[in-house]
Image (tube, rainbow, N blue to C red):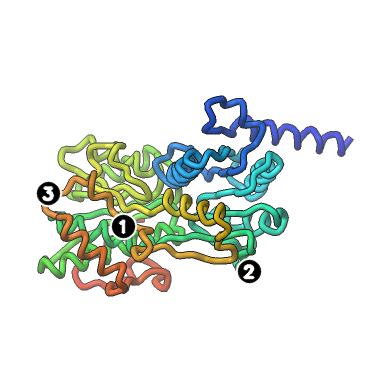
Amino acid sequence: MKKILTILLSCALCLSLVACSSTSDESSDKASDGSEIAMITDIGTIDDKSFNQGTWEGIKAYAEKNKITHEYYKPTEQSTDAYLAAIELAVQGGAKVVITPGFLFEEPIYIAQDKYPDVNFILIDGNPHDAKGKDYKTGKNAVGIVFAEEQSGYLAGYAAVKEGYTKLGFMGGMAVPAVTRFGYGFVQGADAAAKELEIDNVNVKYHYTGGFDATPEVQTLASSWYTDGTEVIFACGGAVGNSVMSAAEAIDSKKVIGVDVDQSSESKTVITSAMKGLSSAVEQTLDQYYNDKFPGGEALVLGADKDGVKLPMETSEFKKFTQADYDKVFKDLADGKIKLQKDDVKNATDLKLDIVTINFVK
């Protein structure tokens, strides 16, 4: 009886994953046949204007250009077992390359790289490690890619103060390394711009929501910040940004800074976005794979020197911060002239700042 029950449960799981999978081919019923390139989505949707979407856009761009079959699989839940089940389904469908976005895939890829030695894995925003986070191992069939979020955050904070804003907010999702680096960079950029402009005081309200969802609670908190005088909030937490945008839209002249991808199309309140090169990183790594140059075993860090971070100046709503201003600070980051505090700092209030005052909101 136990064996029969196990088989039934396994079949149910596979059917659920197939139903959630998708393909960019004209006929969606090809999803069950599997594809050469597979993406396993993180929590959220494929059009989340964040990690999932940025990663998928890179896959689509490369695969469609080179006429390679590709699809994505949405796990049944947020867990290592569910992620591994989705990976297994993709491999059974013929996937040669599996791409996963987000730090939650660090343990699943640590396991999968050994289980499927003939499959190559591209882990975006993380490096494979065991459940305890003590044993880091990136096999020859895997690559870990992370970004210098502190540089992207720095660009956003610097631009905001140069634009004339002195009452800022940082609302992050979960306090994971990628999010904290965005925040630390943001306040350091604001501090640098304030020194250049000889501004006496820049205030930053600082908070982590504990998740990446759009919620009434987040919108209420953002509204209270705006009502209290905050002029622009850096919304750094996936769908958290949608709640912040809704709050900004309800109050005249309040602004938002997006994250990960260009979020200007999401709301007229978005003045710029602290971007990571998700799409380009995926395209470049896929190109390396198909040209027998796959960087297996490496842990890559993409910063300004490798076009891994940027602000979308072509869509940004700036009146004072110019392209020349941007080019100069970007070059200084790329050349290593600007040194930033990041993972060695326990929390934002420990940052060494000259002008910015941080008010940590619980």
Q: Which residue is mark 3?
A: 319
Cα distance in 3D space between marks 3 and 1: 26 Å
Q: Is residue 114 visible in this depiction of the protein?
A: yes
Q: Which residue is mark 1?
A: 206
Residue 331's quadrant in the figure? bottom left
**Which x, y percent locates residue 21?**
59, 34
Residue 289 sits above or below residue 328 on the image: above
Residue 172 location (% of width, % of height): 37, 53
Amino acid at pointer 3: Lys
Question: Which callout, 2 or 3, points at the residue further toward the start of the chain?
Answer: 2
Query: Up-down: is 323 above or below 212?
Result: below
Q: CA distance from mark 2 to mark 3?
A: 49 Å
Labels 3, 1: front one: 3
Q: Residues within 10 Å of mark 2 (few under 14, many from 20)?
A: few
Q: Is residue 225 left or right of residue 346?
A: left
Residue 135's mark? 2
In screen coordinates, is 111 left or right of 25?
right
* Image point (75%, 33%), residue name: 11
Which of pointers 2 and 1 lies earlier in the amino acid sequence? Answer: 2
Measured in 3D between alpha carbons, the distance from the residue under mark 2 to the one under mark 1, in whole angstroms, is 32 Å
Badge 3: few (under 14), some or many (20 or more) residues near its Cα, within 10 Å? few
